[in-house]
Amino acid sequence: MKIAFIGLGNMGLGMASNLARHHSVRALDISPDAIARAVEAGCEAATDSAHAVEGADVVVTMLPAGAHVRMVYADLFQHAAPGTLMIDCSTIDVASARDVISEATELGFAMIDAPVSGGVAGAAAGSLTFMCGGEADAFERAQPLLDIMGANVFHAGPAGNGQVAKICNNMLLGIHMIGTCEAFNLAAKLGLDAQTFFDISSTASGQNWSMTSYCPAPGPVPGAPSNRDYQPGFAAAMMLKDLRLAKEAATTARAATPLGAQAESLYALMEAAGEGGLDFSGVMKLINGSL
Ligand code: NAD
């Protein structure tokens, strides 16, 4: 199968490399260095979008935000052959995802949104989770490729629902991470050490993923970023991006998300303090006053 892969940054490089082990991949990015790294990983360099999609059965994109996705697809629609399958794996606003997929469908392409979780390590290892939105036929065509890049692949419903699943999940993650930080900080201030509180709460009703897999207090979960001075992992700036997307979608849908909005404010403070590059569990430093 011939694949055009556009956007070879932190995530896209690993994903394109994994596809290139099974298929012919033509790689395009605005950064020549990014293309050079993809060529080293077994891809062929594309000179422009027309060259990237020439003879391609599938296009995969992994771009920063909705504006990039709109711009790149406006160009791709001029050059891709009718029936080409398009898979946008970027995390973007729901409205842009739905608009671009709707235009693709009108033009005779098949397209899904397929944002991911699992981070750079998951992209390199081929163990990402994909949350997909779009027509069942398009999803079924995409699944064998998503299986190469990921370990878990979900069809969440119509166009844009992959983005909905992603931002709702990450909004919940941001909220329970902050709640977990507050609980561990209060316990410490009241004289209860992190390990003892962890042993109790991880088997009681406060148990949650932020605590048991990613504990923001150093000690109880040895592999967690809290044990390496909050080096990411999943950066606070990326969490802030997802919380902003959730807020934007909540405004459009007229859904009340007061805790999501509060979480966004706290991660914005972290970024304003110059610490957006820390892991998102580093919000503990904001809570305990050590930032
Ligand atoms: P990145 O900035 O490292 O990569 C984006 C790439 O797109 C860059 O190489 C950039 O040069 C390229 N690009 C930008 N505009 C382009 C254009 N017009 N044409 C061609 N290439 C263009 O970002 P990333 O960390 O790889 O993230 C990509 C997406 O994945 C984002 O939407 C992000 O939210 C999402 N995501 C990232 C992570 C993570 O841990 N990094 C985790 C899950 C999801």
Image (cartoon, rainbow, N blue to C red):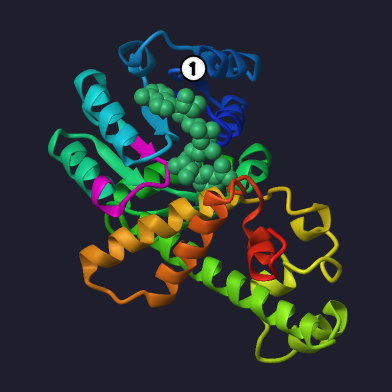
Q: Residue at x 26, y 34 (%)?
A: 70
Residue labelled with disc 1: 31
Q: Is residue 92 magenta?
A: yes
Q: Is residue 224 above or below residue 63?
A: below
Decide which of 124, 34 is in the foreground and name it. Answer: 34
Residue 210, position as x, y percentages in the image:
66, 70
- Vertical placement of residue 62 versus 29, above or below: below
Q: Does ligand 1 reach within 8 Å of label 1's beta carbon?
A: yes
The residue positioned 84% from the left and 87% from the top of the image is: 191
Q: Nearer the viewer, residue 116 or 244?
A: 244
- The answer to whether residue 129 shows anywhere in this view is no
Q: Nearer the viewer, residue 220 or 99?
A: 220
Q: Residue at x 28, y 47 (%)?
A: 97
**Residue kind at label 1, given as amino acid type:** Ser
Image quadrant where one finds the C terminus: bottom right
* Residue sitting at x 54%, y 50%: 271
How crowded is the residue under tag 1: few (<14 C-alpha within 10 Å), some, or many (20+)? Answer: few
Q: In the rendered image, which quarter is residue 36 located in?
A: top right
Horizontal and vertical percent position of residue 241: 45, 51
- Residue 286 vs residue 252: left or right? right
**Percent x, y for residue 32?**
51, 12
Residue 3: x %, y % from top left:
44, 25
Q: Which residues are magenta?
A: 86-96
The stretch drawn in magenta includes residue 149: no
Dot 1 falls on a residue whose secondary structure is loop
* Quadrant position of residue 220: bottom right
